[in-house]
Amino acid sequence: MKKWVEKLVQQFDWGDAADKTSVTERNVSEDRATLLFIIDAVNKHLLEIEGHPVRKVRETLDEFAKEMLKGDEENDERILFRFRQFFSTYRIDETAYIQKTFEEFRTIIWDFIDQLAEDVSDEQKDDSEVRQSLDVLKEAVESNSIEVLKNQSRKFIDSYMEKQFKKEKRTAKKMKSIRKNLSTVKKQLNSAQDAIRIDHLTQAFNRKSFDEHCDQHVKLNQLDSAPVSMILLDVDHFKRVNDVYGHDVGDFILKEVVATLKALFNSDNDFIARIGGEEFAIVLPSFSVEHAVKMAEAVLAKFRNETYIFQDHQIRITVSMGIAQLSSGENKEGWLKRADQALYYSKNNGRNRVTIAQPASLKAVA
């Protein structure tokens, strides 16, 4: 059985004795493991949409994963049918949500365009009337009649001053409206940007932001040899927290984890992302691996000594970590893989520890 299948199965970490069995004993075929991989990928890239809260969707997907792990071939067709039904419904609603958001934003832009077009039309109308008044005034000048010239001059001046007053008033109103519309558009853009870049539950950056951020550092590394380190962090036995206390407590713990990380990694350049269910990444520019280890040890100590209070529950957690410093000429995939291997080593060697990834070896720090 391929290693990636075994690793995928182990990441579910439900914590009971049955889940400690090997992949072979579970009878997990590569086809079934591929479906588990798809479920895992969907789980990591969910949107909070009407009728499908992320927490509920994750619960449903986890149930599908558990059923698939049982290896009951007689029920495979039934499970797949239910999964297709659920996934189709979710994707339809997800598409509708994105389309609705786009339509709302497009409406704002169209209203903005219509207002500008109306303002331009009013300006053109005023200019046309002013030109007509000027033509009348020219005729008065050429008439050689002082009375006609006085009357037309007075009319032109009164008309011109009135239009200038209205223009100034309209301009002030227009600028106020434009500022309001631009503010609305800016809020919509920021909201859309946050929806794309921020994890809705924890307010950490999401996987998309993490990938883009790593790409930037890889490119910078080609120009500048300044160190940059990555810490991957996984909450130990998180599934057990959900099973024992419920998903409300699980969500609370995830938010507290991010709050704790933000308190420890509080520099403007520190980057904290949620890249999986209970997996987080911290990217530290200008940090050598030695410097990152000191910070990781502070993280370990903080979680070891912290008790989280949720209603009547007192919850204590530990975390496992893997650290990799970006090597010269290394791509994002290689960098992430080394950090992930280090994390995997920590999780399979007692947890509650940090492991340093090196090009040729792994060094554990308890």
Image (cartoon, helix red, strand yellow):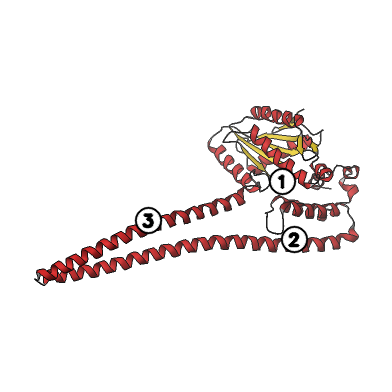
- Seen in the picture, residue 254 relative to 184 is either above or below; the reply is above
Circles 1 and 2: CB atoms closer than 8 Å:
no
Residue 207 can be seen, yes or no: yes
Q: Could you tell me the amino acid type at mark 3? A: Ala
Mark carried by residue 172: 3
Tell me which label, 1 or 2, sits earlier in the chain: 2
Circles 1 and 3: CB atoms closer than 8 Å:
no
Q: Is residue 273 left or right of residue 78?
A: left
Given residues 20 and 218, the one toward you in this image is 20
Q: Is residue 253 left or right of residue 330?
A: right
Q: Position of residue 29 (x, y in %)?
A: 85, 53
- Name the front one of labels 2 and 3: 3
Question: Farthest left residue?
Answer: 144
Tell me which label, 2 or 3, sits earlier in the chain: 2
Residue count near mark 1 (Cα–Cα under 10 Å), binned few <14, some 14–19, many ≥20: some
Residue at figure coordinates x 84%, y 60% from the top left? 79
Residue 361 can be seen, yes or no: no
Q: Position of residue 38 (x, y in %)?
A: 75, 54
Given residues 48 and 184, the one toward you in this image is 184
Residue at figure coordinates x 32%, y 68% from the top left? 125
Q: Which residue is mark 2?
A: 87
Q: CA distance from mark 1 to mark 3?
A: 50 Å
- Seen in the picture, residue 140 relative to 24 is either above or below; the reply is below
Residue at figure coordinates x 76%, y 33% from the top left? 307
Q: Position of residue 202 (x, y in %)?
A: 67, 44
Mark carried by residue 276: 1
Q: Could you tell me the amino acid type at mark 2? A: Phe
Q: Position of residue 54 (x, y in %)?
A: 72, 52
